[in-house]
Each structure stands twice: as C-alpha cells, then as structure tokens.
Amino acid sequence: YQYNNHIFFFDWQLPVYIHHLWTLSIEEQFYLIWPFVVFLLPPRKSFYAICAIIFASIITCAILYKLNSQLPYSQFTLSSFSGLAIGGLLALLKHKQIEIHNRKFLLIFSFLLFVYLSSPYLHFTGKSFLKVLIPLPAILSFLIISKGIEGYKGFIGRVLENSFLVFIGKISYGLYLYHMFIPYITTHFIGNYHLNVGILAMINAAFLLIVSVVSWFLIEKSLNNLKAKFEY
C-alpha cells in the first residue's frame, strides 16, 4: 500500500525492473478485502458491496482526474479496484447461475465505444474524462470471459482450448512478475557479446518461459492445490 502511495503522492521514481509491481500490489490489497465480502456477507449484500466498491473506485478516479489530470490516478489503490470488483461480480453471477442477457449486443456496443474513445482522430469535449468514468477494458473482459466460461465454439474455441495457450495462461502470473527482471539478468551475463536485438529478445523470451515454468511447479501449483482443503 505504501509502495503505491509513494508512487502516486510523491512521484517516487523506482528502478524500471520493479515498477510494474504496483499492479500486483493493488491486486493483493484487493484480495485482503475480498474474502470478507464473500464469507461474511449473504449473496444479496455481497452484490451491493461489489457495486459499492465499483462505484467508489470510479468516483475516486473522477475526483483525482479533476484535481489533476496528469496524476497517475490508476496507480492509486482504490482507483483500480473497479476492474477487480467487476471480476468478482462475474464470479457471483456465475455462482448464483444468473444469466447475462443481451451479452452479444453489450459486447459489440462496448467494443465500439472503446474504439471510439481510444481513437486519436475523434475528439469531443469531455472525452478523456469519459474514459476515466467507464472502465471499458474491465467490462469487455467481463463479457468475453463470461462467454468463455460457457465455452466458445468453432475456430475461436479450438484456439482458446489449445494446450499450449492453456498452459501459458497457467504460468501467466509468473510471466508478468518476472518479465522486467529477465533483461537485466541476461544483459549482466551476455551484455559483452553485443548480440543482435532480435536474438537477445528470443533469449530473454526463452529464459522468461523457463523461469515462469519452474516458478509454477515449485511455488504456484503447490499454493493452488491448497484450495482443495477449503470448502466454499
């Protein structure tokens, strides 16, 4: 939490290879709160609690943006809770077997709105503020994943069910966690060889993949197996 506060309030300049950890810090802060929402509140109140978190996060972004649009408001803890809470909302809906109606229309509309707001060629008053208010990446992820839970058919289904891609998904946390460290390590050991950028990129990718696989089997998989010891 203090790590995020120093970045946000004091413009703390950290080494590049650990700067991305602010996102993981926010995730862990959210997960300190989320179990209490799940276990201590009945489902109906859990729904309202999730909505309150999403609303509070969006309002926080809006206030910080209005105070200073140049602030890295997304790196403030509460500002990033909306996406995580939207994921929690999906889990709650699926657990209660509540169907998401008009999903295809919502997906197309959200995607077109995302493209429109992201376009550098289209401008209108309040465009940047609207991007702050609507967590479109999280909404799109919500809709895509909700369909993925039921299963995609055809070519998209075959691609998403590819065993290599499924395994990459399993080790994706490690890929993100270690990806900024790897170039510094490889440069330290082979920097004097003046390798081609493309070759160096392939070495980094291979090394990252190996480290992430080892991390998955030695650490993450063992921790995931602990879930079987808890009843939900």
Image (cartoon, rainbow, N blue to C red):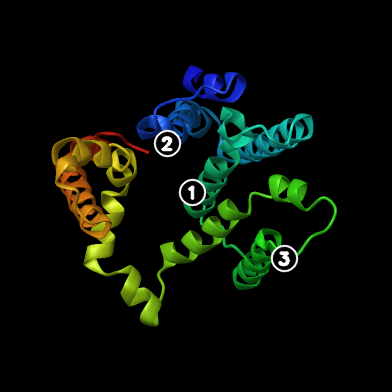
In the picture, residue 117 is in which quadrant? bottom right
Note whether residue 48 is visible. yes
Q: What residue do we see at 33% from left, 73% from top?
A: 159
Q: Amino acid at mark 2?
A: His
First reached walking from the N terminus: tag 3 or tag 2: 2
Local crowd at mark 2 within 10 Å, few (<14), some, or many (≥20)? some
Name the residue nearer the viewer: 40 or 110.
110
Check the image and report above or below for 86 versus 164.
Answer: above
User: Which amino acid is tagged 3?
Assistant: Tyr
Residue 113 drawn at (x, y percent) = 69, 64
Q: Decide which of tag 3 and tag 1 comes sooner along the chain.
A: 1
Q: How far is disc 3 from disc 1 in space, using C-alphas?
A: 37 Å
From the image, state whether disc 2 or disc 1 is nearer to you.
2
How far, Cα to Cα, is label 2 from label 1?
Answer: 26 Å
Residue at which label 1 appears: 91
Judging by the rendered image, the residue that carries numbered circle 3 is 121
> Which residue sits at x=49%, y=24%?
13
**Badge nearest the viewer, 3 or 2:** 3
Q: Tell me where residue 222 appears, x and y as whole percent.
A: 18, 37
- Judge from the rendering whether residue 132 lies leftward or rightward of residue 17; answer left or right: right
Mark closer to the chain start, 2 or 1? 2
In the image, taking residue 213 as reference, residue 128 lies left or right, namely right
Report the amino acid beneath label 1.
Answer: Ala
Q: Which residue is mark 2?
A: 20
